[in-house]
């Protein structure tokens, strides 16, 4: 959350919407964050009321509860605001699946999941067939077995134009793997490569380093594959 982190971002990010404008009034930013924390507390209260109601109705042992969100938000990370970047703060969202039929001895799962997985997962849990060609994967095997493999990687794209005044949003696409992340900025042709295992806060862009050219090529090729496969 420093100016230096902001200045280290690609030109597409620095010249686009969502920069350090919120820092011009720190008091207003802190009030906004207080409001967001209150929203989270109210959500927690609402979920508790729903679970109490299910128990009162005798349905608590036969109801799956899924809690998630549509996106994350930068909230000052890298000096950025908004939700349209491929950085971890923006693309990560909570996903809590409570199934009273499962053993909760190992509640955390490390595999990657996407919002499009919720549809196939809920159909499978309900014993309904998953339509052929439906996007997403059924997560229920992962819920039952922590060692079950998940996705190796997945594709990201943000290509939204806005009519709002001011700088445009940075158009980007990329591939997120378990350890590596590759981002390509469409308008400036800039690239970012992050080693999430050793650099979880995405501070060091490795795209230009000689020792990482092989993984860079691998992820470029993977991006080209997804571009073709998802048309």
Image: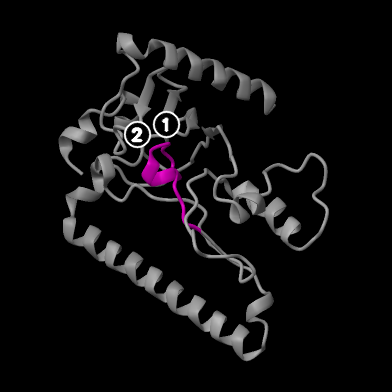
Tell me if label 2 and label 1 are in contact, CB under 8 Å: yes
Distance from label 2 to label 1 (Cα)? Answer: 6 Å
Give SS at disc 2.
loop
Relative to 231, say whether 149 is above or below: below
Relative to 168, say whether 188 is above or below: above
In percent of the image, x 57 and y 65: which residue is there?
103
Residue 215 image point, x, y percent: 43, 16
Using residue 199 as the reference point, say whether residue 99 is left or right of it: right
In percent of the image, x 35 and y 28: which residue is there?
195
Residue 51 image point, x, y percent: 55, 80
Outermost residue toward the bottom? 56
Image quarter (top left, top right, bottom left or bottom right) of the C terminus: top right
Magenta residues, as a range?
Answer: 84-95
As for residue 30 lying within the magenta part, the answer is no
In percent of the image, x 31 and y 20: which residue is there?
206
Which quadrant of the figure has residue 167? Answer: top left
Circle 1 residue = 179
Outermost residue toward the top? 210
Residue 197 badge = 2
Foreground pick, 14 / 145: 145
Relative to 163, say whether 126 is above or below: below
């Amino acid at each position: 959350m420093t100016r230096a982190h902001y200045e280290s971002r690609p030109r597409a990010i620095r010249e686009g919407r969502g920069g350090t404008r919120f820092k011009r009034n720190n008091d207003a930013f802190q009030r906004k964050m207080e409001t967001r924390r209150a929203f989270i507390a109210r959500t927690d209260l609402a979920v508790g009321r729903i679970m109490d109601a299910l128990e009162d109705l005798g349905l608590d042992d036969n109801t799956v509860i899924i809690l998630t969100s549509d996106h994350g938000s930068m909230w000052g990370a890298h000096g950025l605001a908004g939700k349209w970047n491929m950085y971890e703060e923006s693309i990560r969202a909570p996903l809590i699946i409570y199934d009273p039929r499962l053993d909760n001895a190992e509640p955390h799962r490390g595999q990657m999941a996407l919002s499009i997985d919720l549809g196939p997962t809920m159909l499978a849990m309900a014993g309904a067939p998953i339509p052929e060609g439906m996007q997403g994967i059924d997560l229920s095997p992962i819920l039952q077995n922590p060692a079950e493999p998940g996705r190796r990687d997945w594709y990201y794209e943000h290509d939204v134009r806005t009519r709002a005044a001011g700088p445009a949003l940075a158009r980007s696409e990329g591939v997120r793997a378990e350890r590596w992340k590759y981002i390509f900025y469409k308008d400036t042709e800039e690239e970012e490569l992050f080693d999430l295992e050793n650099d979880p806060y995405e501070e060091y862009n490795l795209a230009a380093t000689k020792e990482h050219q092989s993984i860079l090529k691998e992820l470029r090729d993977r991006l080209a594959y997804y571009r073709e496969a998802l048309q």
